[in-house]
Amino acid sequence: MESFALDAYVILKLLWWVLLGVLLTGIGVMVGMDMGVGTILRYVGRTDAERRVAINVIGPHWDGNQVWFILGGGAIFAAWPLVYATAFSGFYIVMLVLLWSMIVRPLGFEYRSKMPSERWRNVWDATLFISGLVPMLVFGAAVGNVLQGVPFHFDWRLTSYYTGSFIALFNPFALLCGVMSVALAIYMGGARLAAAAGEPVGSRARTAAIVAGLVAIAVFSGAGYWVSTLDGFRLVAGPDPAAAQTPLHQQVVRETGALLANYAAYPKLWTLPALAYAGLVLGVFALAVRRPALGWWLGALAWIGVMGTVGAAMFPFMMPSITNPSHSLTVWNSGSSLRTLGWMLGFTLVFMPLIVWYTSWAFWVMRGKVDPAQVEASDHAL
């Protein structure tokens, strides 16, 4: 019975590591799509009516898509409490910047069209741009920092101490990852507008998505080469994965090229970056031949490939430490208890399909093109 419980604990840790990747990918695909629209709002909409078309394409869905953001934070809090506590305390200022930028987002949607003043609407357009660009830039930069390692360590009481600075979080590699995140968001938002917005908004969005897809391909290639030159982390010694443990019970070393060690040991993992390339290349082609709906799904496939590539490179690390590598947080030492992970898995198996179902239903009900005439004629349009 004890052996079964230990095996179940390892399996649950692995399952929640995969589920966290699924939730982060959901943030990129669904939340990123809405934020991509905000980022290119002033490009695709040259007039107020055209900008209202873009806003009303995502207007019925953006708040529902935020569920993925909440689920991602909730999953880290409940399944990986040590990661949550260390990350949110170390990245405190960045989290505030993220929070402030997202607070003005719903205000932009709700208040923009309440007054006909051009200056009033321009101000809220700016907030939609900022609240679209900044969160995705921070999202990508956070991934870039975690790949490189974060400057923190623990004392004997497991109190974490962050030894870096706010500026250091936006280092060149992190910013490159941020550009990748923004490019993918613009791609997803552009593909959505190309499929659901009338002309000329749809054509401009298609162009923006194609350009963003090409940028994402170039950045992904450059980041991949850069990763091969970075110092990664290798777990040298530690307790059994099923044992109760803390980051103080292991030995970790830094090695150049360690981020590619899993790929060398398991060559099948190369299908993940290949998936990212296939999604982006085929997605750009689909947009070029005016198949935006297919292009959107291929963009979602690219997000899966990108996040899978990062996860495979880092495993089993979740938040490595460059201050003291042996204090790094891994899948094995930062998870919740067996009972907590088990109960959470049960609730997830119930509610995750419901979320996917009602999201799909909402998009089905709101299907069809949005054009300026419809927006101008409706009293309920944003």
Image: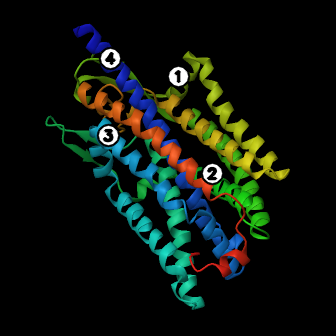
Q: Nearer the viewer, mark 2 or mark 4?
A: 4
Q: Nearer the viewer, mark 3 or mark 1?
A: 3
Q: Residues within 10 Å of mark 2 (few under 14, many from 20)?
A: many
Numbered badge on residue 261: 1
Q: Amino acid at mark 4?
A: Ala
Give me the C-alpha separation between circle 3 and circle 2: 26 Å
Q: In screen coordinates, is 29 left or right of 87?
A: right
Please give the residue where the numbered disc 2 appears in the rendered image. 184
Give me the C-alpha separation between circle 2 and circle 4: 36 Å
Give how far across and how far down residue 361 sits, in percent. 57, 50
Q: Amino acid at mark 2?
A: Leu
SS at circle 2: helix
Please give the residue where the numbered disc 3 appears in the rendered image. 83
Q: Is residue 34 above or below residue 147?
A: below
Q: Amino acid at mark 1?
A: Ala
State the residue lying farthest toward the front: 365
Please give the residue where the numbered disc 4 appears in the rendered image. 8
Quadrant of image for the C terminus: bottom right
